[in-house]
Image: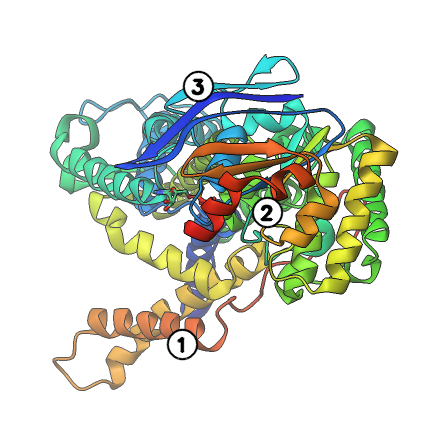
Amino acid sequence: MLEVIGLQKSFGGIRAVNGCTFEVERNTITGLIGPNGAGKTTVFNLISGFFSPDGGKIVLSGSRIDQLPAHRVPHLRLARTFQITRELSKMTVIDNLMVAPLDQMGETLFNSWFRIPSVKRQERKIREKALQVLEFLEIPDLKDEYASNLSGGQKKLLEFGRTMMTDPEIILLDEPGAGVNPTLMKKLNGYIERLRTDEGVTFFLIEHDMDLVMKLCDPIIVMNEGKVLAQGTAREIQENRKVLDAYLGG
Amino acid sequence: MSGAVGFLVFFLTYAVVYGILALGLNIQWGFTGLVNFGVAGFFAVGAYIAAFMTGTPSPYHLGGFGLPFPVGLLIAMGVSGIFALILGFPVIRLREDYLAIVTIGFAEIVRLIIVTEKNITKGPYGMGVIKPYKDLVPASYYSLLYLGIALLVLAILYVAMERAVRSPWGRALRTLREDERVAIAFGKNVNSFKLQVLVLGSMIFGLAGAVFGHFFNFITPNHFLPMETFLVWVMVMAGGSGNNIGVLLGALAVRGLWEGMMFLSDVLPRGIQIGAIRLAVIGLLLVLVVMVKPEGILGEKKTASDILGE
Ligand SMILES: Nc1ncnc2c1ncn2[C@@H]1O[C@H](COP(=O)(O)OP(=O)(O)O)[C@@H](O)[C@H]1O
Ligand SMILES: [Mg+2]
């Protein structure tokens, strides 16, 4: 589904991503782990088009995306979250969700003046979808709350919900569990599992909590110093000496 | 009309002109977060273009094409929009401070061109602007008629802008103002949205210029000093960025303070410069608002779009 081949990206002298090659198979929950500064977030930023790579290829569902402008990438049905939540603080929760869908007819000046019925119909669908997402995440009561008033955990849920609004085939989650309490984390796991089994969504996620990764993800890719160090099932990763060295020695 | 009524009509018409400017800056800064420090430049372009278009032929300045008043307004808007497009196209994709710098430069260049190109604009001597529809009413009532015309323009503009922003389009603008990366991650063509807004807002400044010129009937480069830009910014920030009624109130309040302080000259001791006091008071107002009510007199509406009803 997603192929990364020989990916490279430097910042000044730092080789953040230094020849990364891996593949994310359709309908998996693939984990990406590695010590701090390994280049994981940079890989996400490259895939989602926020950085353009210095070298290498990124292929999503058969088409190369590494030269696309960032706002075109979501149209290939990829959605992402950010390591530090980026809620739209002066907008309501439901508006945070409703802005997400792609190709909204109402997003032209012309159509905001001349509100033809199909614009309203689409808007109504988007609103229903947003309400369903809030229902799914069990926070329907927050819909008219300003996003700035949410707790840290609720903001994480909102970020997650926003990706669901675009009907993606693949969702990139950057540390969905960071700063989230164990109860909420369990719920989040449940949502991820359900979306995968019920809707066939592929997940590619960065996570620091090893217990979580080992339980949720298969396969797991380990990065260190901008390279892929190992990949395999949870068991294989746990038994891999190189991985242990990277974590303990790093 | 008596002196007091005459003054009130003058004051209100002036406030309407600034209300139009404030609506223009509100779509740029209030809704989208674009920093345009060149409001006065587009204002000037609108005023002079309209004057050329509607004036009677003259050997001393460009034109005098004798076109109808509404056509003059539209051409003034169009030309301001084209300037914004030329200016914005290379700059909009850069960091936001570049737009601020480029627009400051643009406004000063426009003003200096007006000063130096005497064959086109009559330079610092200023040029006359016709009174549209002046045969419709007796001369002593004309200012009232023109207030009505200006109010009509403002009302149409207000409805158009309110409808524009209370929509999925406006919601996308708020999104890119709040966090550009989120807008991009959800497929919004941020540069296109910004360019649309830069052009639209600048067309509105041009419209304000045209309405201003036909109101004052005489324009000089000194009407378009950077001070004008500053005043409009205060109107938007004090009135409420992102609220179209709020910025209109801001325009009324700032204009009111500005004119009101004229009367101070009667009570103040001799030798105190009213101009300096005015600026200080406006500055103080801005500081006060930012400290006490940072969102302005009226804050932004909570729900972004109203196309499904409130
Ligand atoms: N925008 C950037 N500018 C400069 N250096 C960066 C940038 N983003 C990441 N880096 C550097 O790249 C390296 C990898 O960072 P990152 O991808 O965030 O690691 P991880 O997510 O695995 O912790 C780090 O050394 C980091 O400082
Ligand atoms: Mg990271």
Query: In the rendered image, which residue does mark 3 sit on?
Result: A56
Q: Is residue B156 above or below residue A188?
A: above
Disc 3 versus disc 1: nearer the observer = 3
Please indicate whether residue A176 sits to the left or right of residue B40 in the image.
right
Residue lying at the far top of the rendered structure: A62
Question: Residue visible at 66% across and 42% down?
Answer: B163
Q: Chain of mark 3?
A: A
Amino acid type, label 2: Tyr
Tell if the residue under mark 2 belongs to the same chain as the one under mark 3: no
Q: Closer to the camera, A93 or B39? A: A93
Question: Residue visible at 17% across and 33% down?
Answer: B113
Q: Is residue B184 visible?
A: yes
Q: Chain of mark 1?
A: B
Please indicate whether residue B202 sits to the left or right of residue B113 in the image.
right
Spatial CA span between label 2 and label 3: 51 Å
Expressed as whole percent of the image width and height from the top left, the position of residue B41 reads: 29, 40
Query: Which mark identifies residue B288?
Result: 1
CA neighbours of label 2 inside 10 A, class few (<14), some (14 to 19), many (20+): some
Spatial CA span between label 1 and label 2: 27 Å
Expressed as whole percent of the image width and height from the top left, the position of residue B167 reads: 68, 41
Q: Closer to the camera, A233 or A113? A: A233
Expressed as whole percent of the image width and height from the top left, the position of residue A110 reads: 64, 28
